[in-house]
């Protein structure tokens, strides 16, 4: 994690020095560090295929679905204080109320968060982080970043990840046994990585079959994050950036009067 | 003067109602054809090959695959030789039909309900529909329809994934262009990749 955090900081510094020119088009992704990012992506793929993917597949094979669901619920419940802090910062009292309710119900009746009783009772689940909060506040996403071991991100979201750690009570909890602190944090990271990778088995298989997985992931991550900042609402004028199909007849025209399509 | 004002009023009325008429026609086009396409996947009396053939016939009529095949390679549509273009378009058509069949199979026999439409231009509209899935979840699907001199054809389809509109042809274009840029515009590299993806899709077909 330290390595990833250092790399992310270095990337942020590098990006800060790079041009800040960005396209307003929603289909565009600003990726001035593409060469570096592609290298990190290749590194992540190597690590994933050698270690994380086989472990995740083994985890799926040797554990029952209910157990994995319990692990997901437990990890999600641990993250609720971070979600709560971000709903407050985003000025969304309904989501804050839901999140407090979920945390109290699932931490008690749900046996330390293993059972998602709150969802059964109809209490909505929210997924907020500080990257989204910054987005709601109008902060641009900045350059696209591929983080070592952590995957796709951007300057804003990478910064957000650091802030979310500060919102996390477990970051500040001190146990008498200093080793226990580290063991709990490490355990959470390792179990979280395996659980997340297990959930992504099909998605990553599909991604790897794409003609250009790097491009597909970059577009998918960016548009998903933009939708998350809008809290799942479709943007106000979703058709404004659609490329014009009407010029198509021109592709047969030898004069080549058709403007080149630029979607990236 | 009276005749002139009547003509002017009639013209103004026509101009005012024209977009609404275009909307209604486009919506009707999507409703009828999308339902025909989904029904073609739900005929138990057909063999798998017959079903694919019927589905492909409907899709060829419903969608402008020729325009889509050119759109997804952008500037390279002018750079491929005639022979490369012919082989590429054949590969793309087979691939696109396999993708659509696999994707739409989850909605076979379900009803496509038109929710409304938006005209980008008088000839370029987006029709918003929902399709109920057998598992009870409704999927929002948007169809981009071009009016080519009275002939309507679909050129792209968007799926709404948690507020994120994914336009299939636009996503395809981003990846195809990146692959072509990386391979110095090699039509063969693209065709090989497309054929590989088609083979995988066909091996997964029910």
Image (cartoon, grey):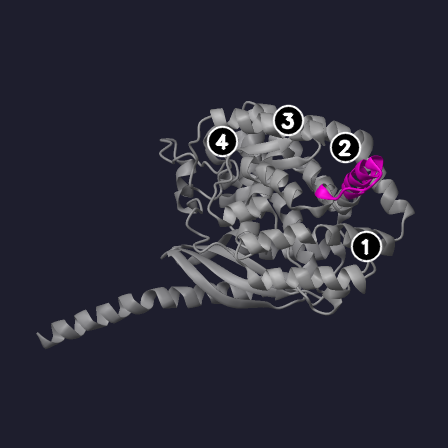
Residue denoted by label 2? A48
Q: Are marks 3 and 4 in contact (CB under 8 Å)?
A: no
Q: Secondary structure at mark 1?
A: helix
Which chain is mark 1 on? Answer: A
Same chain for the residues under marks 2 and 3 in the image: yes
Residue A254, position in %: x, y?
A: 39, 31
Same chain for the residues under marks 4 and 2 in the image: no
Same chain for the residues under marks 3 and 1 in the image: yes
Q: CA distance from mark 4 to mark 2?
A: 34 Å
Quarter residue A42 falls in: top right
Residue denoted by label 3? A7
- A47 displayed left or right of A15: right
Q: CA distance from mark 1 to mark 2?
A: 22 Å
Q: Residue at x 77, y 42 (%)?
A: A174
Q: CA distance from mark 2 to mark 3?
A: 18 Å
Residue B116, position in %: x, y?
A: 47, 66
Q: Are marks 1 and 2 in contact (CB under 8 Å)?
A: no
Q: Residue at x 57, y 59 (%)?
A: B141
> From which residue to which does the magenta span run?
A172-193
Q: Which mark is residue B76?
A: 4
Q: Secondary structure at mark 3?
A: helix
Q: Are marks 3 and 1 in contact (CB under 8 Å)?
A: no
Lower sequence index among marks 3 and 1: 3
Q: Secondary structure at mark 2?
A: helix
Report the label total. 4
Which chain is mark 3 on? Answer: A
Residue denoted by label 1? A69
Q: Residue at x 62, y 30 (%)?
A: A8
Q: Nearer the viewer, mark 3 or mark 4?
A: 3
């Amino acid at each position: 994690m330290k390595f990833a955090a250092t790399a992310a900081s270095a990337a942020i510094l590098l990006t800060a020095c790079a041009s800040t020119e960005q396209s307003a088009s929603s289909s565009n992704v600003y990726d001035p560090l593409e060469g570096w990012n592609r290298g990190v992506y290749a590194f992540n793929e190597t690590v994933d295929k050698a270690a994380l993917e086989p472990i995740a597949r083994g985890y799926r094979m040797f554990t029952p679905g209910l157990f994995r669901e319990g692990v997901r619920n437990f990890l999600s419940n641990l993250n609720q204080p971070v979600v709560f802090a971000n709903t407050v910062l985003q000025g969304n009292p309904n989501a804050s109320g839901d999140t407090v309710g979920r945390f109290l119900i699932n931490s008690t009746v749900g046996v330390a968060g293993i059972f998602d009783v709150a969802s059964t009772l109809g209490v909505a689940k929210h997924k907020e982080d500080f990257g989204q909060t910054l987005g709601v506040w109008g902060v641009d996403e900045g350059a696209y970043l591929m983080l070592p071991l952590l995957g796709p991100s951007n300057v804003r979201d990478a910064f957000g990840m650091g802030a979310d750690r500060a919102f996390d009570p477990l970051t500040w909890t001190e146990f008498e046994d200093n080793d226990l602190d580290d063991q709990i944090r490490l355990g959470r990271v390792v179990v979280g990585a395996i659980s997340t990778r297990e959930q992504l088995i099909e998605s990553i298989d599909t991604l790897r079959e794409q003609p250009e997985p790097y491009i597909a992931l970059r577009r998918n991550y960016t548009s998903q994050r933009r939708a998350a900042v809008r809290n799942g609402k479709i943007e106000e004028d979703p058709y404004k950036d659609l490329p014009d199909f009407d010029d198509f007849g021109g592709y047969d025209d030898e004069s080549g009067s058709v403007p080149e399509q630029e979607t990236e | 003067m009276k005749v002139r004002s009547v003509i002017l009023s009639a013209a103004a009325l026509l101009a005012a109602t024209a977009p609404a008429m275009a909307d209604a026609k486009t919506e009707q086009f999507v409703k009828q054809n999308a339902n025909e396409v989904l029904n073609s996947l739900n005929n138990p009396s057909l063999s798998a090959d017959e079903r694919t053939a019927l589905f492909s016939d409907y899709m060829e009529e419903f969608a402008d695959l020729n325009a889509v095949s050119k759109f997804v390679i952008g500037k390279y549509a002018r750079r491929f030789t005639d022979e490369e273009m012919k082989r590429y378009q054949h590969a793309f058509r087979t691939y696109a039909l396999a993708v659509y069949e696999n994707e739409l199979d989850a909605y076979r026999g379900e009803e496509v309900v038109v929710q409304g439409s938006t005209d980008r231009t008088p000839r370029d509209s987006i029709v918003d529909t929902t399709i109920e899935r057998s598992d009870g979840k409704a999927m929002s699907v948007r169809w981009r329809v071009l009016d080519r001199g009275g002939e309507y054809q679909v050129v792209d389809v968007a799926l709404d994934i948690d507020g994120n509109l994914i336009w299939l042809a636009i996503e395809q274009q981003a990846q195809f262009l990146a692959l072509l840029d990386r391979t110095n515009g090699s039509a063969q590299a693209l065709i090989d990749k497309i054929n590989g993806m088609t083979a995988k899709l066909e091996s997964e077909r029910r």
